[in-house]
Each structure stands twice: as C-alpha cells, then as structure tokens.
Amino acid sequence: MKRILSLVLILFLWSCDESSVNKDDLHYLNGYWEISEVEFPDGSIKEYGMNTSIDFIQLKEDKGYRKKMKPQFDGSYDTSKDVEDFEISHINETFTLRYKNEFSEWEEKLVELDSVSFSVINQEGVTYKYKRFEPIKIPQ
C-alpha cells in the first residue's frame, strides 16, 4: 500500500510541472506565428484554419515585442503601428510574458515551446496555441 501511495504521489508531483520550456529554447519565440487553436477553461476548443493576420515576435534577452502582421500574396507584410512590448521572467520554473501598455497590464505563462509551436495560458485560464507561420507560395 505504501508503495502505491508513494508512486501516486510521485506521479502527481511530476504532473504538476506547468512548463516544459527551457531557457535555451526561448530564441524559438522569434519569428512569425499564427494561432492554431484556443482552449477555454470549460474545455471547449476553437480551431483556426486560415488566418488573415499573424503575430511577429522579437525577443532579445528578457525583453521583446509582439506585432500584428497581414501577409500579402507577393510575400510582403502589411503591419499595424501597434506594438505590444513584453518582458519575460522566470519564476517557480515557469516563464511568464508580462505585457504593459498605456491601457492595461496582463500576463501569459509560457506552457510549451519548440521550433514549430508554442502555447501560453492567460490569467483567465484560456490557452492559446500557435504554430510557426508558413507563407503560401503561389507558383508563377
């Protein structure tokens, strides 16, 4: 009985690790990303097919910015003038992106990150999953 209880406790503690992100992987955030799905706290999921806008993220050391872009058929991008600056911090084995602008402040915890995808969870418990943007190539 003690062995089973010990095993259950170990599995529970192991599953509590919120983040599988390493500091060495943070450079993967740089680049163009499109949202693939959103998971709400009630378990419902909204999937995205084609996106008319994507996010460009640039991170240097612990500071970065996110900017909305609209890909064009010629390979260029239309960009908004709006930029969301953020700082990234490492607290309790979790990386947190902290945004602040003149209107509000908010945080997103970085849950997963690799070269082709990442996900964050916000303060309301909504999880956003992103995939690396691949431009549509039209043969000429």
Image (spheres, rainbow, N blue to C red):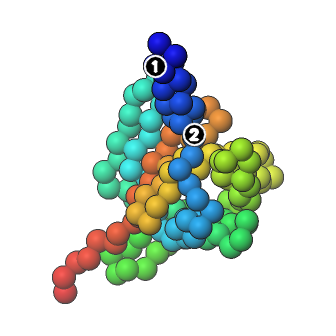
Q: Residue at left 57%, top 46%? A: 19
Q: Residue at x 80, y 52 (%)?
A: 102
Q: Taking 68 as reference, is 41 above or below it?
A: above
Q: Nearer the viewer, residue 81 or 98?
A: 98
Amino acid beneath label 1: Ile
In the rendered image, the residue lying farthest to the top is 1
Which of these two is toward me, 103 or 59? 59
The quadrant the C terminus occupies is: bottom left
Residue 98 point in image, percent of width and height: 72, 51
Give x and y (percent) for residue 135. 34, 72
In this picture, residue 45 sits left or right of residue 9:
left
Q: Secondary structure at mark 2?
A: loop
Q: CA distance from mark 2 to mark 1?
A: 21 Å
Residue 53 visible in the picture: no
Position of 23 relative to 4 (above/below) = below
- The dot on residue 17 is 2
Above or below 109: residue 70: below
Examine the rendering and report whether any part of residue 123 can be seen: yes
Q: Residue at x 53, y 50 (%)?
A: 20
Q: Residues within 10 Å of mark 1 (few under 14, many from 20)?
A: few
- The spot of residue 93 in percent (x, y) is 67, 48
Where does residue 125 sit, x and y in percent of width and height? 57, 32
- Amino acid identity at mark 2: Asp
Taking the view exactly as shown, the residue that stands out farthest to the bottom is 140
- The circle drawn on residue 4 is 1
